[in-house]
Image (tube, rainbow, N blue to C red):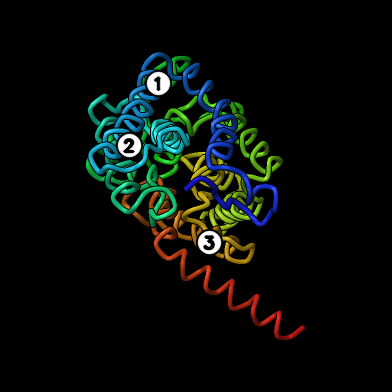
């Protein structure tokens, strides 16, 4: 799959997969640098292991399956990096290896490769690891924190012992959590870059993040609590970099809005009433599965409007 249709834009639609993935890697660069600065050498090791094993997994699978090599399109690099940024420094090297192999071999390659996977590989791998090993998702503190580990902001909101970080710490990432999810500023900069480059549109990130804020405010009745729910957890990295996956998200504007708002609702329901303090990965995974039906709704609306005209 040499070309990837990533938006309605004629320019973006004609771009090569490698070009699109390169833009995503550039957009992820601030969050990657922030992860290493905030969480230290262990974060760098997790990133290297996840990216390296993702590349190796795809390379070996293509050899064994006698398929054309696709490691040069950078999709495996993006998958490995996204998985790494969604893991805590509590994750072990072998867990990183298992997650990357699962993402590439089981979720991506076994379904036919890029363009045929029904769910986002990095999201699926994170959910698998989260269910099997709860410690991989969060709880590790930054190198600047007074303690090495502790409850994440969402866990504290849910009743766990601890003190909520300041708003400044929430923005710059000096708090517990997965290594790539804590620095909101770095993630938002990456999101702006992707929108300017027309790799993604505003629909999913804005509606997902805004939906979580409004629903958290409605469920919790507290403005500051809603702000913590918006900045905390993996919402921003999920809304910008994972829910917008061109293969597993809707193609049209209406479908993207429906998709994002449903993700927001599922996320908030899990956070307030589920057994997990975080719900982003589960929400995106579930919506990936029903994405084709959302596309059908958008297509029917467009056809109705064309007939009316």
Q: Badges 2 and 3: C-beta atoms under 8 Å apart?
A: no
Sequence-first tag of 3 and 1: 1
Q: Quadrant of the C terminus?
A: bottom right
Marking on residue 259:
3
Q: What's the residue at 35%, 47% (across, down)?
A: 108
Foreground: disc 2 or disc 1? 2
Residue 265: give x, y in percent of width and height.
Answer: 49, 60
Alpha-carbon span between mark 3 and mark 1: 32 Å
Q: What's the residue at 51%, 57% (across, down)?
A: 249
Alpha-carbon span between mark 2 and mark 1: 23 Å
Q: Which residue is mark 2?
A: 58
Q: What's the residue at 22%, 42% (across, down)?
A: 132
Foreground: disc 2 or disc 3? 2
Alpha-carbon span between mark 2 and mark 3: 29 Å
Local SS, label 2: helix
Residue 232: give x, y in percent of width and height.
Answer: 50, 39
Identify which residue, 184 or 127, lies in the foreground: 127
Looking at the image, is 19 positioned above or below residue 175?
A: below
Q: Callout 3: 10 Å neighbours few (<14), some, many (20+)?
A: many
């Amino acid at each position: 799959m040499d070309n990837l249709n990533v938006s309605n834009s004629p320019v973006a639609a004609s771009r090569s997969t490698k070009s699109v993935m390169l833009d995503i890697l550039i957009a992820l660069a601030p969050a990657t640098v922030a992860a290493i600065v905030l969480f230290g050498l262990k974060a760098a090791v997790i990133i290297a292991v996840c990216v390296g094993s993702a590349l190796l997994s795809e390379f070996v699978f293509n050899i064994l399956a006698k398929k054309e090599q696709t490691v040069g399109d950078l999709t495996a690099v993006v998958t490995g990096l996204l998985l790494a940024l969604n893991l805590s420094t509590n994750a072990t090297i072998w867990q990183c290896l298992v997650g990357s192999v699962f993402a590439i071999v089981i979720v991506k390659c076994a379904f036919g490769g890029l363009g045929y996977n029904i769910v986002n590989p990095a999201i699926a791998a994170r959910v698998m690891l989260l269910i099997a090993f709860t410690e991989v998702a969060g709880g590790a503190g930054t190198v600047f924190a007074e303690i090495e580990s502790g409850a994440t902001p969402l866990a504290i909101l849910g009743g766990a012992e601890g003190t909520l970080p300041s708003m400044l710490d929430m923005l710059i990432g000096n708090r517990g959590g997965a290594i790539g999810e804590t620095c909101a500023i770095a993630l938002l900069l990456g999101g702006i870059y992707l929108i300017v480059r027309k790799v993604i549109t505003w629909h999913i990130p804005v509606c997902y993040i805004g939906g979580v804020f409004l629903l958290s405010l409605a469920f919790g009745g507290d403005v500051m609590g809603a702000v913590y729910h918006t900045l905390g957890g993996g919402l921003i990295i999920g809304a910008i970099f994972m829910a917008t996956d061109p293969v597993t998200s809707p193609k049209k504007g209406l479908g993207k809005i429906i998709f994002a708002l449903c993700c927001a609702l599922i996320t908030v329901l899990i956070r307030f009433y589920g057994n997990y303090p975080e719900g982003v990965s589960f929400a995106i995974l579930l919506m990936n599965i029903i994405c084709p039906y959302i596309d059908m709704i958008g297509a029917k609306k467009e056809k109705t409007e064309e007939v009316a005209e």
